Structures are given as C-alpha cells and as structure tokens.
Image (tube, helix red, strand yellow):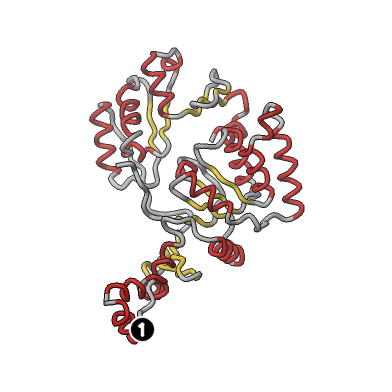
Amino acid sequence: KYRDFRAKFGADNVGLITGDVSLNPEASCLVMTTEILRSMLYRGADVIRDIEWVIFDEIHYINDSERGVVWEEVIIMLPEHVGMVFLSATTPNHLEFSDWIGRTKKKKIHVISTYQRPVPLQHYLYAGKELFRLYDATNGYNASAYGAAKTKLFPPADPSKTRGGAAAGGGRGGGRGGGSSAGSSQRSFGSNTGDQSDWTKLIQHLKDKMLLPVVVFAFSKRVCEESAQKLSKLDLSTPSERSEIHVFLEASIQRLQGSDRELPQVVTMKEMLKRGIGVHHGGLLPILKEMVEILFARGLVKVLFSTETFAMGVNMPARTVVFNGIRKHDGK
C-alpha cells in the first residue's frame, strides 16, 4: 500500500510506520499497522491531534481472536473529530457491525455494499492429479464434478480384494489396507507438503491453462519452505525475466551489510526468485519480503508459497490461489 500511494501522491506526502520500519513519519498520509496507531493513542502522540481521517482496511480482522481487541480499542479511543472509513470484502454482518459503530461513536454511519465481484471466482478441487471445477459464478455448484473428484480421492474398493484381505488379515487389517491409497491421495496436499511430482504436475497444469501467477497458501512457515524446495528443478523464468530479476536482486541486496548478503536465507531466496518461485512469511528478513512483493507485483514471481500474512490487505496480480490444507492448528 505504501509503494502504491507513494507512486500516486509523491514520496514526500506518504509515510510508513510498522514494527520493522519508519519512513517519513511526518508525512500527511501515513500507512501503519493498527498496533502502531493504538500505541500512539496510548501515548497521546501529537500526530493524533492533526488526524482528520482514519481508513481501516480489512476491518473484518476485528473478529480475530488475538488481534481483534486492538482494532476495537482503536475505534473506541479515536477522538470525536476523526472521521473513519471501514473497508472489507468479507464482513457478513455489515449492518450489525455498522450499528455498533454508530452507537459506540454516536455518529450516523453510511453503509455502501455490493455483491458484485470485479473478478468472478471459480472453485476447483485438485484430486488424482486432475482439476475439477466445483463452482463458478454462472452455473453455481457442480455436484457431478464433486462426485467425480470424490471418486478420485476415494476409489471404490474391489469387493473380491476386500473379502480376500479380510480373510487373510482378520477383517480389520483388510479394511485398513483397502483405504490406504485413497488416504495418501487425499493427504498429498493436506497436512503433508506433497511430493515433488505432485507440485510439479500441478504447477505445470496451471501454466498450461494460463493460470499463473499463483499464490499457494500454507498454514506454517515450515510447510511454505519445504513446498518451495519441492520445485527446486522447476524454472519458470524466461531468459529476459531472469536477467531482470538478477539486476533487481543485486541492487536490492546491496542495502544489506557485507556478511548479511551471504546469509543462508538470502542465498536460498535469490536462487529461488531467479527461477520465478518465491516464499513469503513472517520469519523472513523485511528486505526479503519486500523483494518478493515487488517481483510478484511485476509478474516475475510465478509461484509464491505464503502464509496468510500475504493476504492481509495486499493487492497482487494473482490469477490462481491454492490452499494446501483447510485446517490450521491455533494452539488451542
């Protein structure tokens, strides 16, 4: 967002304040995290007196079990003279939420909503190394495609083999053996990271269908990095793209101090990015995350493995989003 605004309104008019960096904090337009704004409100910072508007992007994070309280505190603590704009594409009870805002701030709230998507969504399920379209905006849910995908994941057991397995294994062992192949197929992009052939086949399929760039959301940093390593033999960059990436990387890495340029994380990321593959998560150096974001925005990173942090208010030119799992351990 900072880069977009700086290009549109000029470098002198836009600043950025996060837990990692502080750039031009005296600017008339400041991009910051909600936690930074709350800290300013707690301290009674001078800048609060000069604020006229606060725009909350992705306001649905007020429902987050950990960070939601921060958003709520900021809304309650902002002075009366400050106007507020709330943006979200996924708030289901926007009228109820707006009513709470109005009662809390004792102000009239104007709600503007639409069900029209600029880019209609299509939902696919990857099963048995095939893509099945389960939903699109025109035809809705496709039950037959779901049935076909389910058959790929859980192929019907051969009765003769099942009876033979039960007789040989005492019943329970035969049952377990009959479902093992279906289970491994289902798990390939679930809790595990999938094997090399799985990922190579999927990315090649998306490339053939003109569905790149793709963001692959994984729910842990480890899975992101392990999945990216599975594509170590895949090169998605053309010679000209590879040259452009190399020039950009060399210029960016110069901002690091001498020994830091040879950190394993930096060396590994440079090698991946040259092949059009990237990783983005909270464990990376801030400069590496910024490099990945810029290259992805330019269309030079074709496959990005990321945790959900990449989805928080980041507008990127992805044609496809892949979820390698549907459950995330929340520590509870």
Which residue appears farthest toward the bottom when viewing the image?
160
* The quadrant where residue 65 appears: top left
Q: Give 323 or 12, whichever is nearer the viewer.
A: 323
Numbered disc total: 1
Side of 18 where 150 appears, left or right: left
Q: Give 324 or 179, whichever is nearer the viewer.
A: 179
* The quadrant where residue 139 appears: bottom left
Side of 216 where 59 appears, left or right: left
Side of 97 where 321 appears, left or right: right
Determine the secondary structure under disc 1.
helix
Mark 1 residue type: Lys
**Where does residue 245 sit, x and y in percent of width and height?**
71, 45
**Where does residue 325 sit, x and y in percent of width and height?**
41, 55
Side of 318 where 36 appears, left or right: left
Residue appearing at x 55%, y 46% in the figure: 316
**Where does residue 182 sit, x and y in percent of width and height?**
40, 71
Give the answer, above or below, for where 39 lies relative to 7.
above
Q: Give 301 or 185, whichever is nearer the viewer.
A: 185
Residue appearing at x 68%, y 26% in the figure: 257
Give the answer, above or below, for where 150 lies relative to 239.
below
Q: Which quarter shows the C terminus?
A: top left
Give the answer, above or below, for where 77 lies relative to 299.
above
**Where does residue 194 sit, x and y in percent of width and height?**
50, 59
Which residue appears farthest toward the left when viewing the image?
103
The residue tagged 1 is: 161
Residue appearing at x 53%, y 50% in the figure: 226
Question: Callout 1 environment at 10 Å: few (<14), some (14 to 19), or many (20+)?
Answer: few
